[in-house]
């Protein structure tokens, strides 16, 4: 016999997060800054001009602006930056980290590609960083391969789950760095005398994923990486204060000096990206890793309340979220400064109510106007207070508490105020509440209709029995909204084919996933799977996979991570890394009652679904505004595809 239990991806591990800054004692930020400007073996390579200035400026900024201590920063320049020295320094810093510490690794110099050694690269090439000693004693390349960096992160994760990588180099032969006379920061394999397995030049090979660094490292590791450009673009140097710097590093430093550290890496990188593209529209910094929603250069962080970008346009207030995120007309949101987070809110600007809701955008109006209206093009961040009235509210039943009518009345009033829940009889209920215990130790617990108790994670939803219960039900209701979301109108000309299949450890297809008579997919623990989407539409689309577990946990895997990553008409995209199917720890008895739901959300407008995530890091929405030239919200097409997934386990 086989039964259903909770599915979870190793790609998005469950984490109990706190949002406090690293202010308490015992928390240290470590950094290893590497800059290689003069390569001894590089007679035919373009000479670099900015890495030393990049490293020196970053070191100063980390101390003065980001809370690093000078004694916790290691710097390796030119002849100091041998492969052995870089590896030794990284290992020493990793060993010195405590559980809550941060480890930053920065590299400025040449990057390259070499033939893949273990079959884990789709294009047959490993991305590499080139140290000062470019060749070993035997004449082999001394590059730091992506596989090696993955091993370093895994080593560091034994000490800390907070590893940050920043690369101002190119990881493809097409990438150059320069202004005027271009200076390459990427060395193609053929210029180094190494042929690729594909028999061609590295920069002619197709690549999948987001860009430079895409697929570099196993994304189940706990890290975030920020890279200067995509694989098919150039990373440029520019002049500043009489020195040459990498445009990416310069923009990073400028934004660090002006932005609050209470930004996620996602939001910070988006600001850096805007600076870079103002000067070089052909250079796009990219971000990867499981910690994209963490607070910048801090310990950890989570936006515990869904929040969305808000902009004042000539046509009115535009919220950068809509039906896809489960919002509806009448939803109320609190508006704060764009850098505010729930546990340390910024200046409150007022409240808004949604008047019209489309796929990924909504029109709003003030119900509590701010002292001073937002200026034209002004931005804020809107935190969800309550969902709008819904035609269908999710039913809950109460199994006890009649002997405490005042307590019962407070609970019902609290739950009904969410706009998502209503009290029903047990036969109609999705979930049941029971007052458990005796005397002063009595507390409400959450059960399935059959009586099995649902686990609630206090670290994720706050303190106090009633707030815990309310948050648990809201989490389940939000998951139901995501599970049942449908386009308000027909999807028009949209059409996509979705292929979910099993792969081996190298990501190669090894077989289909079986379905039962009802169309439910069956998987076994330890399975590696991959998804591929083919866009048969006549216009570009953006695609995300949303995994909804029966306990209300929601995980998001975008196949098109940024506004620049639409799947073109007739194009194909796939998950950058294989996803591992695992049995989640916890109360398996409850999960035997239901299957996971895979929801594919496809839209013609960029959508950031990180606000849907529950049970893991709740990432920030990328702020993308509607410009003055488009004051009205255009209609957009979107569609969903649903797959039910059962995990097969023998009794």
Image (tube, rainbow, N blue to C red):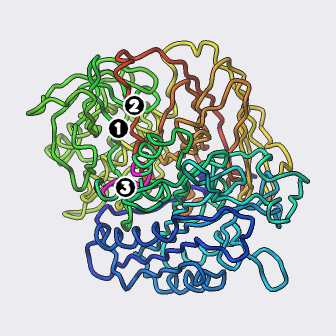
Question: Which residue carries the number 2 mark?
Answer: 321
Q: Nearer the viewer, residue 237 or 524?
A: 237
Task: Please say if the residues under marks 3 and 2 sit with CB atoms less than 8 Å apart.
Answer: no
- Does 533 lie within the magenta span? no
Q: Residue at x 22, y 37 (%)?
A: 335
Image quarter where the C terminus lies is bottom right
Question: Which residue carries the number 3 mark?
Answer: 302
Q: Is residue 179 left or right of residue 189?
A: left
Place residue 527 in its image quadrant: bottom right
Secondary structure state at the residue bearing disc 1 = strand
Q: CA distance from mark 2 to mark 1?
A: 6 Å
The percent coordinates of residue 536 (x first, y second) are 72, 22
Outermost residue on the left side: it is 371
The percent coordinates of residue 561 (x first, y second) are 56, 42
The local crowd at label 1, few if under 14, some if 14 to 19, many if 20 or more residues have their Cα within 10 Å, is many
Q: Residue at x 40, y 27 (%)?
A: 322
Q: Residue at x 69, y 80 (%)?
A: 133
Q: Earlier in the sequence, mark 3 or mark 2?
A: 3
Q: Is residue 454 visible?
A: no
Q: Is residue 523 left or right of residue 14?
A: right
Task: Please say if the residues under marks 2 and 1 sit with CB atoms less than 8 Å apart.
Answer: yes
Q: Which residues are magenta?
A: 260-268
Question: Which residue carries the number 1 mark?
Answer: 308
């Amino acid at each position: 016999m086989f039964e259903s239990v909770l599915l979870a991806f190793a790609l998005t591990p469950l984490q109990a997060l706190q949002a406090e800054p690293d202010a308490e004692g015992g928390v240290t930020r470590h950094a290893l800054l590497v800059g290689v400007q003069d390569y001894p073996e590089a007679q035919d390579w373009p000479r670099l001009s900015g890495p030393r200035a990049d490293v020196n400026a970053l070191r100063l900024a980390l101390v003065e602006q980001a809370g690093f201590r000078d004694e916790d920063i290691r710097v390796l320049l030119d002849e100091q930056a041998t492969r052995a020295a870089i590896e030794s320094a990284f290992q020493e810093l990793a060993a010195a980290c405590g559980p809550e510490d941060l480890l930053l690794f920065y590299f400025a110099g040449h990057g390259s590609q070499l033939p893949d050694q273990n079959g884990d690269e789709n294009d047959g090439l490993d991305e590499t960083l080139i140290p000062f000693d470019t060749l070993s004693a035997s004449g082999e390349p001394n590059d730091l391969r992506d596989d090696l960096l993955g091993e370093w992160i895994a080593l560091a994760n034994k000490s800390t789950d907070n590893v940050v990588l920043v690369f101002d180099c190119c990881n493809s032969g097409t990438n150059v760095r320069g202004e005027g006379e271009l200076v390459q920061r990427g060395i193609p394999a053929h210029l180094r005398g190494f042929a690729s397995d594909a028999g061609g030049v590295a920069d002619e090979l197709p690549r999948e994923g987001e860009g430079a660094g895409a697929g570099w490292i196993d994304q189940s590791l706990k890290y975030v990486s920020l890279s200067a450009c995509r694989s098919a673009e150039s990373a440029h140097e520019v002049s500043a204060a009489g020195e040459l710097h990498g445009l990416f590093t310069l923009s990073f430093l400028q934004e660090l000096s002006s932005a609050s550290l209470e930004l996620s890496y996602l939001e910070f990188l988006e600001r850096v990206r805007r600076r870079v593209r103002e000067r070089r529209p052909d250079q796009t910094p990219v971000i990867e890793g499981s910690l994209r929603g963490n607070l910048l250069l801090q310990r950890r962080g989570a936006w515990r309340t869904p929040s969305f970008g808000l902009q004042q346009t000539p046509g009115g207030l535009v919220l950068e979220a809509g039906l896809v995120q489960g919002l509806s007309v009448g939803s109320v949101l609190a508006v704060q400064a764009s850098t505010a987070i729930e546990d340390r809110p910024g200046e409150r600007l007022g409240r808004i109510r949604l008047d019209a809701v489309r796929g990924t955008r909504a029109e709003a109006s003030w119900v509590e106007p701010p002292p001073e209206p937002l200026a034209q093009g002004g931005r804020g961040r809107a935190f969800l207070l309550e969902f709008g009235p819904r035609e269908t509210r999710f039913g809950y039943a109460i199994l006890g508490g009649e002997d405490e009518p005042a307590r019962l009345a407070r609970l019902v009033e609290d739950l009904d105020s969410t706009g998502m829940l209503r009290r029903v009889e047990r036969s109609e209920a999705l979930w049941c509440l029971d007052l458990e215990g005796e005397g002063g130790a009595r507390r409400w617990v959450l059960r399935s209709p059959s009586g099995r108790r649902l686990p609630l994670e206090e670290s994720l939803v706050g303190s106090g029995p009633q707030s815990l219960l309310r948050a648990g039900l809201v989490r389940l209701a939000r998951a139901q909204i995501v599970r049942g979301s449908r386009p308000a109108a027909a999807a028009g000309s949209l059409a996509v084919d979705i292929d979910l299949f099993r792969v081996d450890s190298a990501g190669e297809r090894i077989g289909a996933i079986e379905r039962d008579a009802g169309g439910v997919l069956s998987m076994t623990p330890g399975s590696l799977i991959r998804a591929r989407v083919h866009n048969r539409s006549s216009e570009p689309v953006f695609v995300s996979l949303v995994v909804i577990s029966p306990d209300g946990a929601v995980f998001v895997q975008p196949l098109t991570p940024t506004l620049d990553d639409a799947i073109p008409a007739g194009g194909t995209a796939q998950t950058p890394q294989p996803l591992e199917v695992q049995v989640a720890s916890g109360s398996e008895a409850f999960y035997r009652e239901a299957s996971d739901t895979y929801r594919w959300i496809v839209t013609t407008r960029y959508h950031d679904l990180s606000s849907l995530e529950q049970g893991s890091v709740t990432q920030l929405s990328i702020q993308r505004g509607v410009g003055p030239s488009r004051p009205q919200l255009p209609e957009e097409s979107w569609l969903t595809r649903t797959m039910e997934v059962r995990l097969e386990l023998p009794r």
